Amino acid sequence: MSAVRQKANLRISSTKSLLCVGLDSDPEKIPEVFSRMADPVQAFNRSVIRATRESAVAYKINTAFYEARGIPGLRDMEHTLGEIPSECMTIADAKRADIGNTSRKYAQAFFDHWPFDAITVAPYMGFDSLEPFFSYTGKLVFVLCLTSNGGSRDFEEQRLHNGRPLYEAVLEKVNLWQQEGNAGVVVGATKSGLLGELRRRAPGLFFLIPGVGAQGGSLEDAVREGVDADGESAVINVSRSLIYPDGSFASTEEYETAVALEARRLHDAMKKVLQ
């Protein structure tokens, strides 16, 4: 089993939580109290991490929110990566894949230069585009399988010539591609009834489950249907509904209190299912 998967499962076992905190940090949305600071995104992310570190198993950095701001954004991403507790899994939500030599550089970027524990990748170009990521046997590679957005119907849910939906073919391939347990899939919590089916088909994969919170997926169902036989090998991502709570905040402490309260609520709901 990959070292990252072992680390994540140890954290799940010790906390009885599956919470993955999505750091979709947008300067236009962060509370005004941070906007007045010299490095607002760094300060905002630091507060989110402080408020959630007792409940979090993983932190997912959506790289688009940092790349969109050029070099300053990449500096914020790098700084944030260093702030995340070492016992928590770090995920680069980058959705990369290309021909082999290009993917090799992507893998080096996110596993060597920025030492993320895991990355999201797209399967459309096939195994040779993903092999450079899977060659890092100690990491986790999350392949997009059945995503939470409505557009998943355009391709992922289309039927192949043999009658099977495309996402099932992706799942089958990821089962074959993994090396030393370093593979996972992205399956949306909004796909009612299908999450459990995919877990039964792939008991040995690690699941990254978005779609809870602002997208309306059921947290309890995601916990119940997403974990493996040991109640592990899954994380449930929550982004906007957690890091952008309603209200205005006069201080960073007020903001952190609101985020910590929501993180504990999510954590408690997960515990009830896992115990």
Image: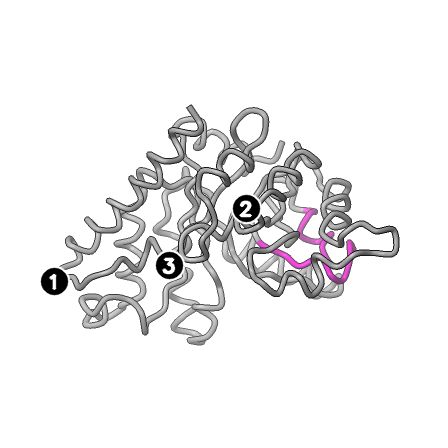
Residue lying furthest right = 161
Identify the residue shown where x is 44% and y is 27%: 274
Q: Which mark is residue 250?
A: 1
* Distance CA(mark 1)–CA(mark 3): 20 Å
Place of residue 54 in the rendered image (x, y in percent of width and height, measured from the top left): 31, 38
SS at badge 3: helix
Identify the residue shown where x is 44% and y is 44%: 58
Mark 3 surroundings: few (<14), some (14-19) or many (≥20) residues within 10 A:
some
Q: Nearest the camera: 61 or 29?
A: 29
Q: Which residues are magenta?
A: 120-135
Residue position for label 3 = 240
Which is in the foreground here, disc 1 or disc 3?
3
What is the three-letter code of the residue carrying label 2?
A: Leu
Place of residue 176 in the rendered image (x, y in percent of width and height, measured from the top left): 77, 41
Q: Are marks 1 and 2 in contact (CB under 8 Å)?
A: no
- Residue 255 colored magenta? no
The mark that comes first in sequence, 3 or 2, is 2
- Residue 123 colored magenta? yes
Q: Is residue 8 above or below residue 136?
A: above
Q: Which mark is residue 208?
A: 2
* Distance CA(mark 3)–CA(mark 2): 17 Å
The mark that comes first in sequence, 1 or 2, is 2
